[in-house]
Image: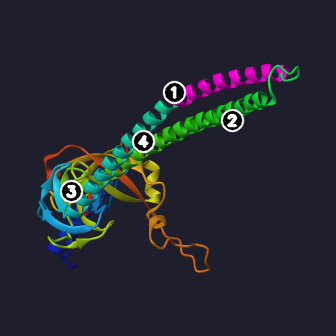
Amino acid sequence: METQKPKSKSAKVIPFILGVLILIGAIFGIKEYIYFSKHVDTDDAQIDGDISPVVARVGGYVDSIYFEENQHVNANQLLVKLDDREFKVKLAQAQSGKQSALANVNVSEAVVSSTAAGIGTAKANVEIAEAKANQANKDFARYQNLVKDGSVTQQQFDQAKAQKDAADASLRASKTQFEAVKKQVNTSESQVSVANSNISSRMADIDFAKLILSYTKIAAPTSGIVSNKNIQIGQLIQPGQSLFAIVNDNSLFVKANFKETQLEKLKEGQVVDIEIDAFPDVALKGHIYNFSPATGAKFSLLPPDNATGNYVKVIQRVPVKIKLEKNEILSKLRPGMSVKVSVHTAD
């Protein structure tokens, strides 16, 4: 009877190793299942922020630059000054126009005063003419009755009639002169109104010239870091030309692009763990702020058109804005940095 050979040592070790591997795999699978049942992750995310482009509102030559590339500046800090001599001349012209308009007002008011004084004289002349006309008409009426019975000669009657006609004509002339003086006063008053409105126009010219002059001093619209500088001293810039950009302080956030199949468990206010590629040892927290109204593809330069015969379904991604909690690392973060986010969906 043959003796049974003892099993080799390797035959005993292999099942043990396989068992250990299966156990480790099971533990890892259970751990991953528990994790992903309470979290939604994506590495398609990056730091973003508000970037304010600064453009020129008037054209001119760059006179002075008061900042350096990547320098931190404060809101309303003077950064660029353009050559303002031309705009100062235009302001002086506008101010001179105002003085001329004021002088015209004074002249017009003087004319009104002088013509108004003439109204009294013209009215007095009318009253005198009326008195003379009344007296002449009464004398003529008496002579007209007396000439019938021969009490006065025909010559005296003709003389009375001539005096009456002259008095009536003088009265008509006085009234015409009086009306002319009144119209002249009205015209002069209208000229005063026109001159006053001209002052308002000249004041508007001054305000506009001051506004344009102020545009030669370009200040920071917000606090932040200046970047993308593309101007030099002596350079001629045009209105609307981009000069530089400012990355706003305290405006950083994370824009994470989640798959549309991941959105079911996401909602506003959920806590987010953020892992920064540049600072892997920093634990940064945030929360979901809002969701984009459309997928990222819809905002692309050439949005896809699925109404074609060769359509292939592709899972789309929806941008989600994540607000960051206060952390010392925020001062070192820059828009465009890559991050990985994990949303707590169990809360």
- 3D distance between C-alphas at marks 3 and 1: 59 Å
Which mark is first along the chain, 3 or 2?
A: 2
Image depth: mark 2 or mark 3 in front: 2
Visible in this render: residue 268? no
Q: Which residues are magenta?
A: 121-146
- Tell me if 151 is positioned left or right of 83 in this view: right
- Tell me if 132 is positioned left or right of 211 in this view: right
Image depth: mark 2 or mark 4 in front: 2
- Find residue 123 and report its horizontal and vertical position in percent: 57, 27
Q: Main secondary structure of the magenta part?
A: helix
Amino acid at the residue labelled 2: Ala
- Find residue 346 and report its horizontal and vertical position in percent: 37, 42
Q: Which residue is mark 4?
A: 108
Q: Secondary structure at mark 1?
A: helix
Amino acid at the residue labelled 3: Lys
Q: Which residue is mark 2?
A: 169
**Residue 212 within the segment the image draws in magenta:** no
- 3D distance between C-alphas at marks 4 and 1: 19 Å
Quadrant in which the N terminus is drawn: bottom left
Q: Which residue is mark 1?
A: 120
